[in-house]
Each structure stands twice: as C-alpha cells, then as structure tokens.
Image (tube, grey):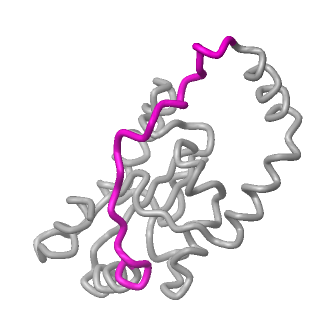
Amino acid sequence: MDSAHAVTVADERVVAAAFIDGYTYRTLGYHLRFHLRYLSPRRWTRFLRKRKLPAQLREAGEADEVYTREYPERSQLTQDYQHLLERGVSLCFVFSGGMGLSFNHERQFYEMLSPLKLEGRVTYAFYPRADHLFSVPEDRAELLRKLTAWAVGTVPPRALTG
C-alpha cells in the first residue's frame, strides 16, 4: 500500500490529501476504450514504423517494469475512502495519461469507485496528455497552480481540469 494512502487513513490529524496517479482499477469503460485504440491510424503508423527499426533499438517506454505496486482490494479502498469522507478529509485525485495501461478515460475514476458516488464530494482531474511526471513545464505549472488553489480552498470539487 502506498505510504500516503496508509498515513491518510491511519492518522486522524490528516485533514487533506492529494493523490497523483493513485490506485486504479480497470472498468468496463476502460476495456472498451482500450480496444478502440486499435482503430487509431496514428497507432498503426507507429506500429509499422517500429517494425522497421533495427532489432537492437527500442522505443522509449519499452524497458522492463522497475516499479511494482501493491494494490488494496477495491472493497478495502472503497471502505478507506468512505472513512476519510466521513472524517471530513478533503480529497484530491489527479490522473495523468501516463497511466494508460490501467487508466484511460475521465469517467473511469467515478466508475471504479461508483458505490461512493464521489462526484461533487472530491476534487478530481484527468490530464490525458500529461505523463506521470508532468515533464512538460507548462503541464507541471498548470498542475501546481491548480493544486495550490485546491490546497488553499479556492477550487470547488471537479474544477482542476481545464
């Protein structure tokens, strides 16, 4: 379990928490969108170009996995978030496009935790064009500006995107 999640749940002094590329669970919407990507001409162009690369070369992102993450059961995560909401903890969830193998569309966050009916109860944003590190300076500056506004309480729930 991620340290930030564990501390937020366990320590009553925590009054707010922001999770960037937190836990994700694949939903029906995820699977539909995942398979629709094969209809993208850009994806086929990239595939064909890659086939022409010499065998010793590879594109960025093809390295073996160096970081693995232990996920709580979805029912446990749902219970944890319910507890935090009952405690009055202000929660902010941000997802980037860098989670494409497990998170690929804006509604997925609400779908994966649907029993909690989180819309309007938490602050949430999806940045599909940003990578996990928000490497592009403009993306990073926008994220920091909006997270700061959330932290000082000037952003209503769901207002981080855009």
49 lies above or below 17: above
Magenta residues: mostly which secondary structure? Answer: loop
Q: Indicate the quadrant where residue 86 lies.
A: bottom left
Q: Indicate the quadrant where residue 55 lies.
A: top right
Depth order, front residue of 86/154 = 86
Q: Which residue is at a point 75% across and 58% down the rendered structure image?
A: 33
**Residue 75 lies in the magenta stretch:** yes
Q: Position of residue 47 (x, y in %)?
A: 78, 29
Name the residue furthest front: 55
Q: Position of residue 131 (x, y in %)?
A: 51, 36
Q: Which residues are magenta?
A: 54-77
162 lies above or below 59: below
Q: Position of residue 58 (x, y in %)?
A: 59, 20
6 lies above or below 65: below
**Residue 23 lies in the magenta stretch:** no
**Left of 32 or right of it: where is 54?**
left
Depth order, front residue of 129/145 = 129
Q: How many marks?
A: 0
Q: Which residue is at a point 76% across and 22% down the rendered structure image?
A: 51
Depth order, front residue of 141/65 = 65
Q: Which residue is at a point 21% across and 75% down the rendered structure image?
A: 9
